[in-house]
Amino acid sequence: MWSEALPPGHVVGGRGALEAFGQRLPRAWRGQRGLVVADAAVAHRLGVVERPLAAAGAQVARLVLPGGEASKTWASIEAIVEAALAHGVRRHGFFVAVGGGALTDVAGFAAAVYLRGVSWAAVPTTLLGQVDAAIGGKTALDGPHGKNLVGAFHPPLLVLADPWWLDTLPAREWRSGAGEVAKAALLLGGEAWAALAALPAPPAGRAALEQLAGAAARHKVRVVAADPYERQPDGGRATLNLGHTLGHALEAAAGMGPLAHGEAVGIGLLAACFLSEAVLGLDPSVQAGVRALLQRWDMPTAVPALDARAVRGFLTKDKKTTAEGLRWVLLAAPGEPRMSVVPPALVDEALARALDPGVP
Amino acid sequence: MWSEALPPGHVVGGRGALEAFGQRLPRAWRGQRGLVVADAAVAHRLGVVERPLAAAGAQVARLVLPGGEASKTWASIEAIVEAALAHGVRRHGFFVAVGGGALTDVAGFAAAVYLRGVSWAAVPTTLLGQVDAAIGGKTALDGPHGKNLVGAFHPPLLVLADPWWLDTLPAREWRSGAGEVAKAALLLGGEAWAALAALPAPPAGRAALEQLAGAAARHKVRVVAADPYERQPDGGRATLNLGHTLGHALEAAAGMGPLAHGEAVGIGLLAACFLSEAVLGLDPSVQAGVRALLQRWDMPTAVPALDARAVRGFLTKDKKTTAEGLRWVLLAAPGEPRMSVVPPALVDEALARALDPGVP
């Protein structure tokens, strides 16, 4: 078990973290009413969360949502608001979000706007949630125009990332998490990158991935703590977007469902490596290592079904676009991220490769 | 013209404020793209806002919404997001909300959540907006369960409250604003309360009300600056809720339309005076003075059409309810607000009076 401060709260992770939930609960919640918003996939395992809350004298009700990207809608916010009002959750009450990254995103956004903001905790139950989505206070909804274009910075008071939940995780969710762990390993460099490049195929590789996931989560905590609102123009929190610029556009163009987030990020990492070779002279062995990993883990390395113009359209809507153009996170080497505006012709080439399954 | 600091921005008010818009624009907006979100009622008068923006090198597009309480919905947020994306408004871009209190509430909430938050300015064009709604950073939507149950604290960088807009204000909007000005005068006491009690009937009384509105706006700025997030349990920002506890419940029970906000607040002020007499010994001449004012201004002093149980149901959902019960803002005297939990039987009596047009 490990613990890191992330103001205004803490992130606690690793095996055993769930047992510590009761001790880590914010004191202000004792005696208050709260709402547990849970992903349907884990609704049968909520005792580990609800028992410590009851023991602390909090009165909680439970709302189960379908989970998954399709739940990141205003209809979910209305369902959460209705359930919270019905249970009598007040301004000093709280929400606890238990589920995957989409569930913690939407429940966190509900916490940001219910009665103009109540405190909350995130209990991520997927690999993706534990290494990325639930950490850092970004909450959001999806809309017809793209993912996460509406949201709020509303950090939880507690994030509890225990791999206990992962025991029943479907193979696709493992792959999706692997994409984000790969990103973190590229940003960390050194041992993490070496461990990633050597990661065995699943199921044998899952234990090693779980270890690497802890390092990935702690890396994110440190980056967010140093730049909580993503205001450092050259680095800081924006570096966490490695692989996401194209990844988000691929996801948006594909529509919900066909491409898991981590799978899109995996393809985005290949594109970032390709651009980094051209712009910063990144050693081609890095792209080769990422590609080999994706293949070992049965993850796609291209999305042939998409239309390049549609993807380009979503690229121009990226939240990180500035007046001078879209800024990409590139790598001079593993562990050495750099922000860079990339020439449009080069972006087009990277995009063509991402849509071409024939790239070796 | 007057100006008050209200971090992170300023509030500028009085005749002549509009001419100062260009000089007061946040520097960071120069050269950025922004969206003007305007109430249909003032769409023909937007040049005074858009010209200074263009002169400062900002590129703005315009979205006109119907305005009014019915526009405080998620559908409006989606329309604003779509228009902002289409115009290319980025994280460093901005919104300018021009309209009544409902319009600045909904556009402000859109600014709070678009790309997880962009900066904004409010240009309130109604008396209600200029003395209350646009000041203080509270933004919100309405839903099936009540008013303002979803929202965010997201203070604008600039509030520009120029009575120039009021020249074409309908009589009902003057009455609605009068309810909030009356509240402020009761909280201010002294000369403000004396001026309110002596306020002539409209249209002659409008010039005096405009003067009093400036004092009301500045009072709100000072109270909000001292307690921006309404965290002081005994006073501070919560005192601004005088007349609103019952007022909001009446509005919610009446549904949108029949009862203007300021009219509901006017009836709520009578109830607050009644409770204050019983609990704090407030001089009955205060309630009599408020009642006489409402009558001179053709404002209702009761809502006979409502069901007491429905109103009571909404009272229990009030955002300010704590574990010990609903806390009312009462008055020991004009200028001396006190927070107080009121016995249920007394609340029932106040409610019965608010629904009985026969009370003298």
Image (cartoon, coloured by chain):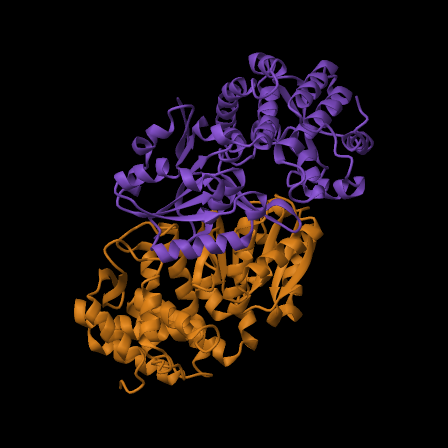
Chain colours: A orange, B purple
Residue A213 lies, with reference to residue B242, above or below; the image says: below
Residue A101 visible from this viewpoint: yes
Residue A96 horizontal side relative to residue B218, left or right = right
Percent x, y for residue A135? 46, 58
Q: Nearer the viewer, residue B291 or A147?
A: B291
Percent x, y for residue B235? 60, 27
Residue for point 26% across, 45% down: B31
Percent x, y for residue A169? 54, 76
Residue for point 78% across, 33% down: B355
- Image quadrant containing the C terminus of chain A: bottom left
Q: Quadrant of residue A234?
A: bottom left
Q: Nearer the viewer, residue A208 or A257?
A: A257
Percent x, y for residue B281? 75, 17
Residue A117 visible from this viewpoint: no
The mark total stands at 0
Q: Nearer the viewer, residue B176 or A329?
A: B176
Residue B82 lies, with reference to residue B307, above or below; the image says: below
Residue B25 lies, with reference to residue A296, above or below; the image says: above
Residue B44 horizontal side relative to residue A354, left or right = right
Q: Nearer the viewer, residue A339 or A343?
A: A343
